[in-house]
């Protein structure tokens, strides 16, 4: 019996080794030369940060801080990013770069059995669901940007207050009004298609190189304005001075959930992108850089919003979720001088953040179709995006005319959001950590972290320890608490 087991183990190792040799040889001989790659380190960081920085940083993070006791949440969030976020990101990177394929193909290339590559398939499905509703929200940001540029939102002759309430009602109508949001969603889908068809290097990388610096610049400008507001210090105190008594298990769980969403973990995005990383890239350092930049954006948003909140005496309802960015902040702009400029800048920021994220989510499916079915990029983009047109339409309409169709008591939009982000994403992350920590070819992760033993660091074994023991348990906690909620 024991002998049998060791034989099977030996066979397993052999087949894993074979997969390894195949990958090494084939990439050296150029069989895989079809595989695109990011052209520069800066470009791959810009693209990955572009995926991570999105609506999660700009609206979800401040809303979570507000709902979870201010600075206490911030402290736990930072701990979660370091303790779990970075190690899980490194794990996805290792899997993607070793597997050199889409989220399913990566597992297959490493010799993984069906049960494991199904995890990749599940990740692709989750990201596809997210794509359907994320396109709709990206469409809203586009409409707000457009309206800000043309000045349509603020033109009430009775002055500032009237403009603010006009804005509110216009926007609330807009989201549920059938045609308008649809047109905007289609515009965003179209832009996505163009970038994706152009390709990884010339499309995704170039766009990110251009837009990410712009995003940081706009954030810094807003930060300057916000920090010089009259009651800025009070807002800063709420955001930065932790009240230890507010650190509770439920706040910790929310912080971990936010870290996952914000770092784009568990959706196959990082597996897909890291397959485009050159061999020499230091995965641990890249994960740290991306996570830090993502964290910086979240913190800058806090520094922008909380001083504004106290200076303009905003509270309660106006700070929850989507209301914060789509209603409250525009109201703030309408009370400031230079309304149109501020509003245009802010929605440009939001649109850029949303666009680079949608592209990364869509690329997961595009890479899948391309690699699995040997399709051209153009064909893969069409196969992926045409159904998105239909499903995003349903998601958009589920906010208005179709809102009476409920799944588990939620409209389609909310159902997909809850299912994908609260349930599918943690499941994928747990299984991926378990695979990489316990079942992947022996030494695979260390090989990836150390770039074939050319780098060394003590953190590598810490990361592997976390991936094996700590991360799966902590993520399981988030998952279970999600079910209970
Ligand atoms: N990380 C992105 C954000 O913070 C969210 C995202 C979700 C990105 C899904 C890609 C896919 O908004």
Image (cartoon, rainbow, N blue to C red):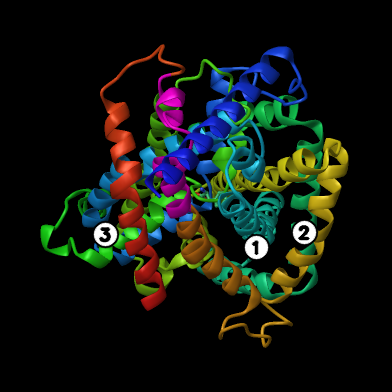
Q: Residues within 10 Å of mark 3 (few under 14, many from 20)?
A: many
- Nearer the camera: disc 3 or disc 1: 3
Q: Which residue is mark 2?
A: 388
Pick whichever of labels 1 and 2 is earlier in the sequence.
Answer: 1
Residue 223 seen in render: no
Task: Tell me whether the residue at label 3 lies in contact with that at label 1, contact meaning CB atoms closer than 8 angstroms.
Answer: no
Q: Which residue is mark 3?
A: 252
Residue occupying the point 44% across, 38% down: 91
Pick whichever of labels 3 and 1 is earlier in the sequence.
Answer: 1
Q: Residues within 10 Å of mark 1 (few under 14, many from 20)?
A: many
> Mark 3 and mark 2: span between their CA atoms?
35 Å
Q: Residues within 10 Å of mark 2 (few under 14, many from 20)?
A: many
Q: Residue 155's x, y, as percent?
A: 65, 61
Where 339 falls versus 23 (above or below)? below
Where 241 falls versus 327 (above or below)? above
Pick whichever of labels 3 and 2 is earlier in the sequence.
Answer: 3
Q: 85 or 98: which is nearer to us? A: 98
- Residue 395 appears in which quarter of the rendering? bottom right
Image side of residue 70 versus residue 215, left or right: left
| Magenta segment boundaries in residue numbering | 429-450
Image side of residue 49 versus residue 235, left or right: right
Disc 3: residue Cβ within 8 A of ligand 1's nearest atom:
no
């Amino acid at each position: 019996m024991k002998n049998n087991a060791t034989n099977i183990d030996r066979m397993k190792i052999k087949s894993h080794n074979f997969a390894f040799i195949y990958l090494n040889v084939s990439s050296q001989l150029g069989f895989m030369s079809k595989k695109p790659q990011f052209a520069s380190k800066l470009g791959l960081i810009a693209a990955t940060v572009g995926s991570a920085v999105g609506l999660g940083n700009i609206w979800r993070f401040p809303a979570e801080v507000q709902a979870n006791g201010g600075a206490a949440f911030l402290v736990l969030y930072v701990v979660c990013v370091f303790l779990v976020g970075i190690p899980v990101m490194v794990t996805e990177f290792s899997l993607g770069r070793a597997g050199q394929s889409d989220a399913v193909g990566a597992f297959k290339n490493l010799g993984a059995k069906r049960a494991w590559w199904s995890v990749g398939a599940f990740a692709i499905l989750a990201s596809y669901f997210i794509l359907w509703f994320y396109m709709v929200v990206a469409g809203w940001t586009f409409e707000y940007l457009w309206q800000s540029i043309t000045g349509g939102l603020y033109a009430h002759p009775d002055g500032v207050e009237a403009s603010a309430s006009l804005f509110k009602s216009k926007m609330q109508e807009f989201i549920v009004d059938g045609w308008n949001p649809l047109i905007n969603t289609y515009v965003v889908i179209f832009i996505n298609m163009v970038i994706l068809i152009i390709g990884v290097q010339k499309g995704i990388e170039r766009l990110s190189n251009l837009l990410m610096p712009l995003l940081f610049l706009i954030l810094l400008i807003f930060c300057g304005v916000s920090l010089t507001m009259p009651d800025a210090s009070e807002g800063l105190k709420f955001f930065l001075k932790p009240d230890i008594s507010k650190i509770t298990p439920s706040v910790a769980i929310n912080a971990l959930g936010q870290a996952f969403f914000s770092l784009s973990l568990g959706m196959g995005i990082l597996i897909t992108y890291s397959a485009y990383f050159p061999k020499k890239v230091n995965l641990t350092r890249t994960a740290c850089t991306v996570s830090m930049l993502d964290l910086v954006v979240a913190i800058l948003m806090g520094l922008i919003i909380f001083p504004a909140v106290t200076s303009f005496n905003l509270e309660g309802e106006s700070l929850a979720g989507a209301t914060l960015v789509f209603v409250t902040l525009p109201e703030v702009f309408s009370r400031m001088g230079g309304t149109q400029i501020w509003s245009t800048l802010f929605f440009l920021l939001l649109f850029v953040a949303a666009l680079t994220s949608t592209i990364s989510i869509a690329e997961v499916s595009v890479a899948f179709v391309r690699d699995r079915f040997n399709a051209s990029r153009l064909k893969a983009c069409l196969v992926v995006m045409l159904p998105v047109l239909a499903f995003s339409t349903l998601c958009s309409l589920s906010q208005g005319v179709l809102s009476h169709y409920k799944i588990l008591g939620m409209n389609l939009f909310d159902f997909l959001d809850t299912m994908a982000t609260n349930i599918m994403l943690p499941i994928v992350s747990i299984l991926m950590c378990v695979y990489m920590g316990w079942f992947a070819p022996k030494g695979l992760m260390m090989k990836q972290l150390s770039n074939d033993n050319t780098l060394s660091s003590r953190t590598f074994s810490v990361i592997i320890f976390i991936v094996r023991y700590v991360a799966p348990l902590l993520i399981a906690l988030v998952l279970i608490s999600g079910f209970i909620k």
